[in-house]
Image (spheres, grey):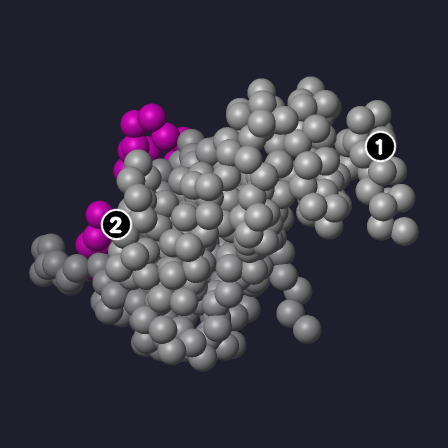
Amino acid sequence: MTITINAKQAKEAIVQCFKAGLVPMLVSSPGQSKSSLIKEIAQENNKLVIDLRLSQCEPQDLMGYPIINNGKAYYAPFNTFPVKGDKIPEGYTGTILLLDEFNSATIATQSSAYKLVLDRMVGQYELHESVRIICAGNLASDKAIVNRLSTAMQSRLIHLHLDLEVEEWLDWAEGKIDYRVWHYVKFKPKVLKSFDPKHDDFTFACPRTLEFLSKLIRGTEPNLALVCGAIGEAVGREFVGYCKIFQEIPTIKDLISKPLTCTVPEEPSTLYAITGLIGEYLSNTNAISLITYIERLPIEFQLITLRNAIKRDSSLKENKDIKTSWLKISKQLV
């Protein structure tokens, strides 16, 4: 059984590898934000990221360009690689060299990276002491274009298997992506990890494509063709339908200020959406108003709403108004 780590654990493990002078190899299913995670590490540590796609390299690219000087042939490293004697880029403390799509490179190119990964050398030149190396790639089991690493390369790397957690992604994404995308994932969390290597659609929903979707619809109404082109037809149609439901839901501001007059939807799908919205925003400061509205919902949706809120913040169980409402619901359901 493969041991997996979430994004927070992956960041901590990668930094620990860097401190030990070792090279981590981060793998996951496609679109799980490996590159974004590495860029976050770089930003937090004031490092410049050099993104080298190993799958696009030839073996000689890692040796350098042959030149002749005083009758002898040398390999001059490409400027991709900071070597000893180079200046650290202004405003940074060093560089993270990301060897992305590492296990999609040919065996010959992987073999040419032995020296780079273990000895920190490009041809005859040593990497700058401030450079940290990380490799990244997809899983062979996900039908990605992957070549098995040789045992010689396997033993040069620290292998980390990233498995994204939904709540972790929601925490990261809140305020960064379009609110409709965020609420849709909150409403249907399985969509974030719905990747199936046997799928027959032209694309699929994952953290990467959901970010694409957010950029496409921000400030405008979702276009079905564009939405499906970003996250696949089945999920795309469902998302557009969800957006129509979302338009029928009162805003959280209205629910707090007008709990007795805001419309109570009748459609189950809309009711589920509103339970997710209230469950996200219910707090000790607005409990009196929102409980007033919650108690106007059908009894089963009252229960779902309170469960959503308490799951998010267990301290709400101690709130006087929420306790009272929970007791009323319990008595009606007995």
Q: Nearer the viewer, residue 69 or 321?
A: 321
Q: Nearer the viewer, mark 2 or mark 1?
A: 1
Q: Position of residue 21 (x, y in %)?
A: 53, 48
Q: Position of residue 280 (x, y in %)?
A: 62, 37
Residue 141 is a magenta residue = no
Give the magenta part as a residue range: 75-97
Query: Residue 222: in sight, yes or no?
Result: yes
Tell me if I can see residue 115 in this picture: no
Under mark 2, the amino acid is Thr
What SS does tag 2 mark? loop
- First along the sequence among labels 2 and 1: 2
Count numbered badges in the picture.
2
The quadrant in which residue 226 appears is: bottom left
User: Can you give x and y, in whole percent of width and height, for residue 45 in the image?
Assistant: 47, 33
Residue 95 sits in quarter: top left
According to the picture, the residue beneath numbered tag 2 turns out to be 80
Q: Which residue is mark 1?
A: 323
Figure check: 13 above or below 108: above
The disc placed on residue 5 is none
Q: Vertical placement of 89 versus 301: above or below?
A: above
Q: Was residue 93 drawn as part of the magenta stretch in this picture?
A: yes
Q: Residue at x 32, y 75 (%)?
A: 106
User: What residue is rendered at 49% in x and 49% in y?
Assistant: 184
Q: CA distance from mark 2 to mark 1?
A: 61 Å
